[in-house]
Amino acid sequence: MDTPFTVLVYPEIAYNDALGIAAVSQIITADLSVHFEINRDSAVLAFNRGITATATTELLKRLSNNRIDENLIFALHDWEKRHSEVVLRKGLVLTLSPERRYLAETKPLSVLIKETIAPGVYLLPETAENRASDALRKAGVDIIALHTESQSEDGETSANWFSRSNFPPLQAEGNLAVKNQHPTLPGKNETIEDSPAPTLTNDFYSILNEMDIGPEERSELASRIDRRLVLCESQLKEAFIRYEKLEARGMDYAGKALIAKQAIAMQAPVEVIWPGRQKQEHIFGIPRALEKTGGESILFIEPSSDQGNTIRLPLGKISLLRRIKKSIFETTI
């Protein structure tokens, strides 16, 4: 510990320990040695990943031979307490009317409930929609409401929903024009088509529409135009864009398998989240192998915090698999 809230890391540190410190802090300087700072924002990000104040304290005590300031220990626990007082949770919300709340006690559904938010309001894993629907149907429920995020929060009526604004505009045959996919310029209320005079942005979209590139590259270039990162025509035409998938969720088995194979080949660290008995489980580690067992793909991961103890996880059980890039200059295999 350099100061009560800063950590000085030397090149001799183990990789897993450096990764652990980086997960709870922010880099101040990087030279022959690296300075990390632990502050409220970095601590909150760590708590969001499931890293506790106690785990952080134990890590710092071990690496500093117990030379950790009491002010830092107090601050970490205080931030953790405040972090637990106001919570935004991500998941599938099940609501049951008073006469249907008995369903929450049935075994197929009760095992999916992570938390009871309020009477008749239950939080389920975000990947459990199909399992929850099956459990409800087995319990005799024949009508299940599935409200999506696109539904209006202000009680939009069905008559208003059928307005023309809810349907895509008619397009000519062939590829859709990119400027129709990005109709509004940043900071303006007028659309590109209705702009009173030609602009540089319009010219960039015209060039982009004629480029023979894939949808991912097209979307990335359009985003750069919107963010005013393209300043001249040569930047647009000579741009080399390579779409790289770094994370996959839920039912995206192909995506999770691709990311796992890339991480194994590169020995790159990954972040893995999967539903546990009481709450979501969460680890960082290095994937060692992906094997097919009994028709199911099993990912073998060596956690960063527990060397030598390999965890076996079915791909279907993983709700989030994210590969962590070791460097901003890293390229995909």
Image (cartoon, rainbow, N blue to C red):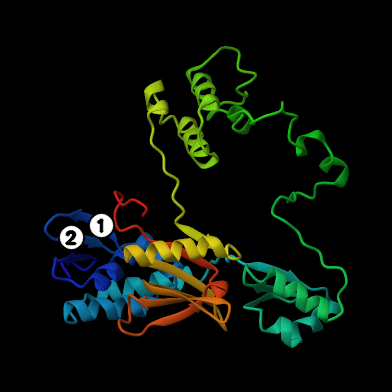
Q: Nearer the viewer, residue 331 or 116?
A: 331
257 lies left or right of 1: right
**258 over 176 or under it: above or below:** below
Q: Secondary structure at mark 1?
A: strand
Q: Which mark is residue 210?
A: none
Q: Which mark is residue 27?
A: 1
In this rendering, does residue 88 appear at all?
A: no
Instruction: Report the Cα–Cα distance between label 2 and label 1.
Output: 7 Å
Residue at position x 14%, y 66% in the image = 11
Quadrant containing the C terminus is bottom left
Residue at position x 30%, y 78% in the image = 57
Q: How many marks?
A: 2
In this rendering, does residue 124 appear at all?
A: yes
Label pair 2/1, CB-CB below 8 angstroms: yes
Three-letter residue code for mark 1: Ile
Three-letter residue code for mark 2: Val
Q: Secondary structure at mark 2?
A: strand
247 lies left or right of 144: left
The location of residue 32, given as percent across then percent down, is 11, 58
Among all residues in the image, which is located at the extreme top?
197
Mark 2 sits on what residue?
A: 34
